[in-house]
Amino acid sequence: MKAVILAGGRGTRARPFTDYFPKAMIPVYGRPLVSYVVDYLFSFDMITEIIIVADIAGLGGQIRHYFANTTKRPRFVQDSASGTAGDLRHLYPVIKDEPFVLWFVDNLSAIDLKKMYEQFVKQKSVACIATRQFRKEETGFAKVDKGMVTEFIEKPLLKLPDCECTGIYILSGKILDIIKRSKPKNPNLSYDVLQKLSEKGLVSSFDIGKTPWIDIESPTVLEREDDMVRKALRQMVQRR
């Protein structure tokens, strides 16, 4: 099975940093963010090749340069800036009809991809999304009774009313044909593709439970969520 890392986003929330390097190259404790994702994906025997979709003609060229002398080199595909689904259109010659992992580069989590794939197969899915129901809040809460605070709760772990989607998927190769037929010029994977498939019962969910997951949307997240980032990375590195 191949894995595709989407690393072509402009990273507007991470400016001004991303005016000088792509989000995939955000330094995380001495290493680029993308290097953790690549190492983690290669830790699974089921992953035979990694493809990075990035603006290699622009700032994304830094990613290819970083991996130039590594033992396991990812393959690179030029980002088309045509939406999160549109960028996958160019993968058909590489993916064909095979299922593949899709990982948005700013996500860090030690998700068990083997079990996720088993869920994908069991449910006869066209797409399987890693989701979570538990989230540790960044702020404190207070219990209030008749206008009076009765208890303070510091950054609790809450069960969400709806599942939160991470940026990690297992997709059938058939989805590339579906994307080709989609009407929007720059289709969004969730709203323009998966939404319609979910209405047909073709999208499954893999609950990651209380496995740490974090979206490194900008370098400031690293400082604000230091404990969570370190916990997620520790679990990812332990697989190697």
Image (cartoon, helix red, strand yellow):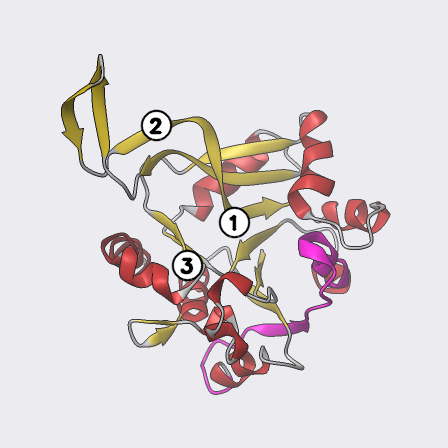
The mark nearer the N terminus, 2 or 3, is 2
Which of the 4 image quarters holds residue 60? bottom right
Q: Residue at x 59, y 67 (%)?
A: 10
The image shows residue 178 at horizontal and vertical percentages of: 79, 44
Specify few, some or many for label 1: CA neighbours under 10 Å numbering under 14, 14-19, or 20 or more.
Answer: some
Instruction: Give the residue type at disc 1.
Output: Gly
The mark nearer the N terminus, 2 or 1, is 2
Q: Nearer the viewer, mark 2 or mark 1?
A: 2
Instruction: Give the residue type at disc 2.
Output: Lys
Q: Which mark is residue 159?
A: 2
CA gap between label 3 and label 1 equals 11 Å
Task: Check disc 3 and report the residue beneath it.
Answer: 216
CA gap between label 2 and label 1 equals 19 Å
**Vertical side of 172 occupied by 15: above or below:** below
Q: Which residues are magenta?
A: 68-90
Q: Which mark is residue 167?
A: 1
Q: Residue at x 27, y 34 (%)?
A: 157
